[in-house]
Image (tube, rainbow, N blue to C red):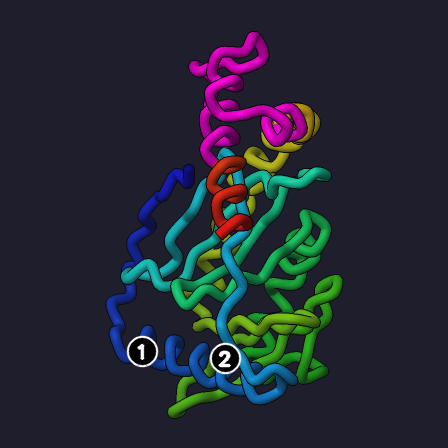
Amino acid sequence: MTTKIMVMDTAMDPPIVDVDAAEEADAAKTQCQEQASGSCSPQHRAMRLLSRRYDLTNTGYKFLEIGINVGPPSYVEIVVGDHRGHELSLSLETWKSLYEQRWNIYKMLRNEYKDNFISAGPLIVRVCTLNDATLVRLDSSSIRITMTETTLRHIFDFDGCIDVTFERLARLVDTVDVKYTRFSNTSENAIRNSDFFNGRQLIDCELLASVFNTYEKNTM
């Protein structure tokens, strides 16, 4: 259901990728210790329709994704994530705030900014070091994502793509909610044979698969 687009990183530097992954592991360990339950298992990935995913590193370890998070109510969601299951969810307003602060973030990476953190909506952006490598850390109330400057610059390269995709998906949110409600109250075979199901429309096909995949997991 996700259109995956590979973006090659021209800076071939395996140690930096390894450092980035190590910082993620360290952040996950810290979060685990802080949880009362003692469990650090990532939450199950959200159901997103018509999503596009852009790989941000050579290995595809980190990615930027935009799609419709199925409700109801459904909404367009922008996510920065990694293959450990960590996902930082951004609204369009937060994304734009982060993008507008990019030059200040670059200054902070070079110790040229007045403060040691930057606010971008609900996000706090900081700079940290690991094994002599300088990393950018994005903190929300529930998740932390760290990355190299190269990865951060890749993210900002997709601002135009995010604008176009967000506008297109936002027009479909109401349709997704209507169809999701109908599909949820109807058996799979009945949906396929109904007048409101169009097997030639991607929304219908993805939503049909998603609804019953979710139902099966909830009843296991």
Q: Position of residue 205 (x, y in %)?
A: 45, 25
Q: Amino acid at mark 2?
A: Ala
Q: Which mark is residue 47?
A: none
Q: Residue furthest top?
A: 195
Residue in the image at 61% along x and 40% along y = 70
Q: Residue under circle 2? A: 28
The part of the chain drawn in magenta is 180-209
Quick one: quadrant of the N terminus? top left
* Residue 83 falls in image quadrant: bottom left
Residue in the image at 54% along x and 11% along y = 194
Residue in the image at 71% along x and 83% along y = 115
Q: Is 2 rendered above or below residue 184?
A: below
Q: Is 172 rendered above or below residue 161?
A: above
Whether residue 176 is visible to the viewer of this picture, yes or no, is: no
Please tell me how crowded label 2 is: few (under 14), some (14-19), or many (20+) other residues with Cα within 10 Å.
Answer: many
Whether residue 187 is visible to the viewer of this picture, yes or no, is: yes
Which numbered mark, 2 or 1, is in the foreground of this view?
A: 2
Q: Residue furthest bottom?
A: 131
Predominant SS of the magenta segment: helix
